[in-house]
Image: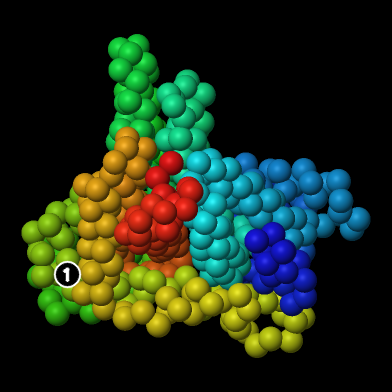
Amino acid sequence: MACVIGYQLFLPPIVGLADNGDFERLMGRVGLQYTTEDREDRYFRYINTKFRVVEPWWNSGVISSQQLLLEVAMAANRVISKDGLFDLRVMGAVNAVCFLASVWLVLYASRPLPIASRAILLGLVALIFTDVGYVAYFNSFYSEPASLIFFALTLAASFFALTASRPSFWHLVFFSVAAALFISARAHNSTLGWLLALWGVRLFWRWPRPSWRLGVLAAATTLAVFSCWYYLATPAYIREANLYNAVFFGILRRSPSPEEDLSSVGLDRRLAALANTHAYRPDSPIQDPEFRRAFFGAIGQYDVVRFYATHPNRLVLTARRLARHAFLTRPERHGNFLKESGYPPRAQSHRFAAWSDFKARWPRDLRFLVGVFVLLLGTGVAARWRSASVTSGLLSELLIILGLMAAVQYVAKFMGNGLLDTVKQLHLFNILIDTCFVFVVLWVVNLLGNAFPASARGPQARLEP
């Protein structure tokens, strides 16, 4: 895995993901600036690897655990830089090392599994998560790498607690910290806090000592409260842009009756002229005082949720449109290469893209997407019903939790930000779906192995720890 990731990140032509305008949210806080003033070279078309190191110049208000990884990269760059510039590949190296360490912890925690199952686990993880659709984010200042890294760390913490004869205080701390880092990677992750809190209670409830269970409840409550705080701590300008997009690029996106839709959420029907626009257009009225009074003074995120709850046909329609991009992992408008590499603008890498190419051929249809969810959740329920031990039962419940997390992420995407930037913002959704796929394959392998007589299977043929 290290060789495949390193080949993509560090050997020419190196791979990264071009800036869509989000980089500055982290760059400003640590004091990084582009070395070019050409907007076409900065955004979307190409990646840049060299950045000027200056005094911090903008506090974006964004809180992200990716900032911790960036601070480590800044410290490392001060040691190795010879020209005083920051090299994006240092950020890529920090992301890669942290990701590989998290994966190693997952594999180490799964050591009670039979060797064959561990080999399959390693093979699937290597195939899926060294794909360019995931690795390209490492050479960037996006917060998506933190989602992947700390999600893997949360899985590792779960597996350590699962395989322990009795979970300890340190298991609980490890899980809680990893989950908090995952939740705080980006604002969209905060919608999953209550599911992680629920999973934490289920995971650590096995020890019946009253004081222990009180501590578990306290940790879960803290995690849930932290999720709410983190969502509310999202800067107002981001929440406002998301709300704008959720209405004009979500509810009104190709709406058959935009005036009626606006009335149903309490907005002036004359705003229908803004249908199919988003907050980041140069001509967006989002800063216009009159518009702000007419829009933000009359609507909140709750009204968007209420609209979809009371218009199930529109919920299905929007979900169907999003399904066209659900399993794509490479944002089409974002280039992967340096300008000096000779590739055309917005060119994408096709090295180590077997998994993302395979998923890109999946049907882009809501019925197929629903079928995937039914398969994942059905497998979790069937595995729970067939489980012969506490550990295997909890693993089955973890699959169900991950499937529910993916469903929540999918719905939260268009309710929270409309249909803008869908591929990038479904990054975590794909992480969850792909992880569930690994679980399903391992369960099927175990099921097939158990179908043979014990003498034919040999020792350690069962998947269950």
Image quarter of the N terminus: bottom right
Q: Residues within 10 Å of mark 1 (few under 14, many from 20)?
A: few
Query: In the displayed image of the protein, which residue is found farthest to the front?
Result: 455
Residue 391 lies, in percent from the top left, at 36, 38
Q: Quadrant of residue 270?
A: bottom left
Asked if residue 282 lies left or right of residue 418, the reply is: right
Asked if residue 180 lies left or right of residue 300, the reply is: right
The kind of residue on which mark 1 rests is: Val
Image quarter of the C terminus: top left
Residue 402 lies, in percent from the top left, at 34, 51
Q: Note whether 441 is above or below 404 in the view shown.
A: below
Q: Is residue 87 visible?
A: yes
Q: Quadrant of residue 202?
A: top left
Q: Residue at x 77, y 71 (%)?
A: 11
Q: Which residue is drawn at 63% across and 52% down?
A: 100
Camera-nearest residue between 213 and 327: 213
Camera-nearest residue between 124 and 326: 124
Q: Which residue is drawn at 26% across and 64% down?
A: 375
Q: Residue at x 56, y 47 (%)?
A: 107
Q: Is residue 48 visible?
A: no
**Numbered marks: total:** 1
Camera-nearest residue between 396 and 267: 396
Q: Mark 1 points at which residue?
A: 316
Q: Note whether 234 is above or below 4 in the view shown.
A: above
Residue 341 lies, in percent from the top left, at 75, 82
Asked if residue 148 lies left or right of residue 402, the reply is: right
Q: In which quarter of the image is residue 322?
A: bottom left
Query: In the displayed image of the protein, which residue is found farthest to the right?
Result: 82
Q: Which element type, helix, strand or loop, lies under badge 1? A: helix
Colour mapping: rainbow
